[in-house]
Image (cartoon, rainbow, N blue to C red):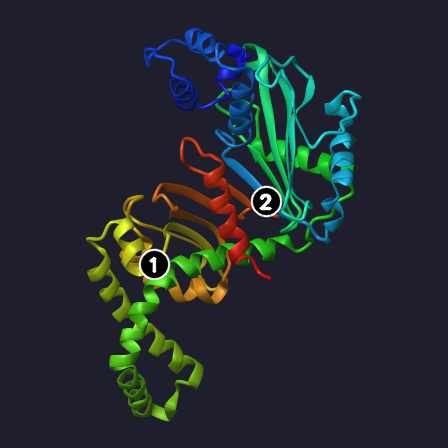
């Protein structure tokens, strides 16, 4: 069953699509009471599966990713995985679980203030019957009397323990529009410490550097997959001429005041200037999909914030969300500083997945100890979640 109090925590368009997929005709502008009534006529197993997906992903667009500082192969054993589930005794209310998966019949029901519930878990296994992932949904309700809401605010913690890549992933929805005192980062800190205390897990101590390099590597990939085509053309056609010209100019200076390192900077700056003009001419009229197909790259950066010792905090962004940063002249002015410092605090990347659906993602490492991925789409699903997670795994430092 779905209670109307829970409906506001779901993406309503997704609820409507689910009802329609079950061959129920209705007015798309039906009120909430009518939507809940129609939803509850659908088969119970279908409803549970839908709610599992929606609460694991759906509106849970703040994703916190932590690298676990140890090999957690011992969790490959299903018995150990179930022990982890049972360790959340404040949420299990003393119930002992033994099955590989569980979904509470009350997953769509109202939650009382200060009540804590385990709504779902699923222990996924690989072909060798080893546990490779555990998905968990914990829920609670916090008082919201200050905002005049007697029902309180529901907090759904969507948790994944990835035993293959040693990752702890926590997804949450930002509820500050409903609860004025709600701080998603604070709620994340609370549930993270709760999990770590319960299962005796340590996170990477220098995780800031780990995640900073992950963001840099992703940005480097999407930018230079395109730009290397232009730099290669420049090197092949006029690279030697540029280097020889800079040498000659250097000899004309009194006492050869430019050293080899500074000379290399000048050469790279000249190449950057050529690359800027070539890329703007080649890319300015191309759509993101055309760039993907032409240069074999599935994403583009449209905003970046980084810190450099010489120029401090710097931001640069494209004119519109549909335009790559490579089309802006300011990007090439700061490109060398960004690559030298490799200290990117935030990057907004537009991915085009296997279906060419756009996934608008912000990678953020501004706050110490937090690697936060924000999905800017109104809604996201497991396929999108896996796509972004795979990028993080692929470009994280080994």
Q: Is residue 179 visible?
A: no
Q: Residue at x 49, y 34 (%)?
A: 61
State left or right for residue 292 relative to residue 49.
left
* Mark closest to the chain's N terminus, 1 or 2: 2
Q: Can you identify the residue that label 1 sits on?
A: 296
Q: Secondary structure at mark 1?
A: loop
- Vertical placement of residue 35 versus 164, above or below: above
Of badges 1 and 2, the one in the foreground is: 1
User: 10 Å neighbourhood of mark 1: few (<14), some, or many (≥20)?
Assistant: few
- Say which mark, if any, is on residue 65: 2
Can you say whether 346 is above or below 231 in the image?
above
In this view of the protein, which residue sits in the foreground, 338 or 289? 289
| Residue 14, x across and y down, in percent | 42, 24
| Element type where label 2 sits in the image | strand
What is the C-alpha distance between the residues marked 1 and 2?
Answer: 27 Å
Q: Is residue 301 visible?
A: yes
Q: Is residue 288 above or below residue 62?
A: below
Quadrant for residue 31, please give it: top left
**Marker disc for residue 372:** none
């Amino acid at each position: 069953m779905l209670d109307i109090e829970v409906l506001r925590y779901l993406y309503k368009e997704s609820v409507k699509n689910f009802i329609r997929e079950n061959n129920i005709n209705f007015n798309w502008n039906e009120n909430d009471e009518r939507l809940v009534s129609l939803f509850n006529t659908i088969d119970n197993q279908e409803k549970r599966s839908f709610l599992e997906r929606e609460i694991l992903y759906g509106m849970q667009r703040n994703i916190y990713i932590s690298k676990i500082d140890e090999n957690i192969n011992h969790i490959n054993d299903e018995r150990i995985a179930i022990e982890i589930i049972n360790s959340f005794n404040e949420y299990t209310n003393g119930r002992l679980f033994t099955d590989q998966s569980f979904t509470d019949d009350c997953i769509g029901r109202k939650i009382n203030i200060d009540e804590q519930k385990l709504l779902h878990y699923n222990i996924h296994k690989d072909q060798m019957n080893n546990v490779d992932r555990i998905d968990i949904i914990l829920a609670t309700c916090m008082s919201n009397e200050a905002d005049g809401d007697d029902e309180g605010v529901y907090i759904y913690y969507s948790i994944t323990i990835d035993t293959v890549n040693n990752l702890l992933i926590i997804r949450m929805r930002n509820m500050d529009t409903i609860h004025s005192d709600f701080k998603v980062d604070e709620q994340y800190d609370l549930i993270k410490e709760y999990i770590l205390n319960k299962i005796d897990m340590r996170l990477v101590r220098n995780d800031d550097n780990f995640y900073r390099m992950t963001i840099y590597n992703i940005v480097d990939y999407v930018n230079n997959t395109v730009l290397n085509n232009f730099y290669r053309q420049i090197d092949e056609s006029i690279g030697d001429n540029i280097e020889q010209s800079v040498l000659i100019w250097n000899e004309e200076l009194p006492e050869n005041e430019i050293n080899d390192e500074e000379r290399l900077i000048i050469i790279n700056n000249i190449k950057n200037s050529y690359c800027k003009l070539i890329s703007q001419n080649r890319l300015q009229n191309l759509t993101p999909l055309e760039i993907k197909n032409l240069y074999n790259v599935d994403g583009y950066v449209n905003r970046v914030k980084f810190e450099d010792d010489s120029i401090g905090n710097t931001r640069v962004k494209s004119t519109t969300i549909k335009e790559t940063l490579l089309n802006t002249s300011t990007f090439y002015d700061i490109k060398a500083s960004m690559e030298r410092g490799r200290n990117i605090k935030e990057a907004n990347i537009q991915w085009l997945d296997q279906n060419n659906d756009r996934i608008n993602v912000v990678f953020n490492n501004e706050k110490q100890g937090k690697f936060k991925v924000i999905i800017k789409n109104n809604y996201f699903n497991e396929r999108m979640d896996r796509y972004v997670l795979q990028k993080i795994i692929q470009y994280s430092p080994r």
